[in-house]
Amino acid sequence: MSKVGPLVRRFCAPIPWVVRLLTVLCGPLLLAACGSTAQDASATTGSTTSLLRWGGDAEGGAPFVEADPADASTVRGFDVEIATLMAKGLGRTPQFVQVSWPSIEQSVARGDFDVGMSGLEDRPELRARLAVSLPYFEFREVLAVRPADTLRFRTLADLAKRRVATLGSTQAYAMLLEAQKSHGVVPVSYDDDVHPYEDLVSGRVDAVLLDHVVAERALRRTRGFVVQPTALALGHYVAVFAPHQAALRDSADAVLRSGMMDGTLERIFRSWGVWDDAQAQYQQQLITRLADTTANAASAATADRPRTTSPVAYLPALLRAAVITLGISLAAMILAMVAGGAIAAGHVYGGPVTRGVLITYVEVVRGTPVLLQLFVLYYGLSGVIRLPALAAAILGLGLNYAAYESEIYRSALMAIPRAQLEAARTLGLTEWQILRLIRGPQALRTALAPMTNDFVALLKDSSLVSVITVVELTKQTAIYATNVGSWVLPGLLCAAIYLLMSLPLSRLARRLESRWST
């Protein structure tokens, strides 16, 4: 204890000086931040209310919202111009807030901005949770197919047992889920609207179901598919407000209604190439209907069926996704253990060239994000080898974790006392026999705890494979949360399922470790 005291005092002596230095450097910044926060809170009629903060996703691209090629700090698109029209009509200045598309509804509900717009689709459950504007644009759900399949695939019924791609948490995704029950269609959910059409051209999916606006934009960007002219359903784009902002919604509706009647919206849509005869007919019908109704009566324009928000209805889908998550994790871990063991053995027993190659592999894999590796495997190498999504997920996670496992096994092998190895060689055992009978079993006991920890981490990292169209537990939970408008219950269910999968493994590992230690 007499030695520990001086060490602690010596270690802690610089702390007051560090605190003083941080106070000097950061104090003015903190005071400025606190001052600006206080001003924002007190300025109820000041500059804060003169802004109309609207949220959208510039990653979605034109014609909705995209970064301006001439000035990447600004955005453009027809939703940008409609937000500007709203702000002008309300006497405010528009201010764009970047937010990922799946999070727009949640963010506007918690007050991150005043209005959300970015090709948001009108849905009954959306109107049950938020204040929703009148539907200012009508889109058509259309099928995109390869030219050779133009006559074969005209409806969802023609695509029985075929893979059909779309964006998750959309009207099109709900249509595919219904078609899965009635026609055996296989829905494939994506997080963006670029890769579905690329995968259609490459043959990974048989069709894509999305808005005609998105399909026509993709056709200009990617060749090799055609868009079927027949609409399978109609939908509408809307703006969303927090539930307590109904008055602001009504004022925005008045601006939109005025823009429809004086032709401003038509000019905006024409400038972005999305105005056609069907849109003109819809706008005229809506103007006629609005002339005799209140500002919010146009909600009847949406013909979606209401969807259940009961957790019981979503539990089977969550459990199926959990099975997929567990299967991917187990298969990837087995691959990681086999590959990691081979890398560790090469590192310990191999020559300089072998060790150099293996060290390079380990450092490259550990030094780059697993998400990037998944993208390269699935999309980057598609011109060379077209891996199924499930195989790419297992291979990507397995090869990534093999680098980490190899270091665990290498350190465990090196931890065996040299005297034991020399004694075994003296007795005439070969290196293989030493590894199998002496070094390996002891190294396994040492590596068991970090191996278990890696598997639990792999179980959670499997959520990343949703970017290559695998609907695992976290992705299914996100779909559930979007439908019910809250992450509380879906998040708790997801966490409980993850715990049910990981805790038994941890207990088993502790039991084995305790048994082997005795």
Image (cartoon, grey):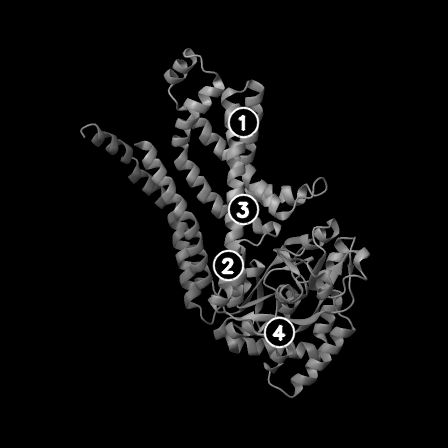
**What is the CA distance from the residue labelled 1 to the residue labelled 4?**
56 Å
Q: Is residue 281 above or below residue 384?
A: below
Amino acid type assigned to the residue bearing label 2 in the image: Leu
> Which residue is tagged 2?
318
Mark 4, Cα crowd under 10 Å, few <14 / some 14-19 / many 20+, is some
Residue 22, visible in the rendered structure: yes
Name the residue carrying label 4: 304
Q: Quadrant of residue 11?
A: top left
Q: What is the number of the mark on residue 359?
A: 1
Which residue position is annotated with label 3?
Answer: 328
Nearest to N terminus: mark 1 or mark 2: 2
Judge whether 445 appears above or below 322 on screen: above
Q: Position of residue 4 (x, y in %)?
A: 22, 30
Amino acid type of the residue that numbered disc 4 sits on in the rendered structure: Asp
Identified at 35% across, 45% down, the residue is: 23
Whether 23 is drawn above or below 40: the answer is: above
Q: Looking at the rendering, which quadrant does residue 154 occupy?
A: bottom right
Lower sequence index among marks 3 and 4: 4
- Is residue 47 in view? no
The residue drawn where x is 58% and y is 60% is 101
Element type where label 2 sits in the image: helix
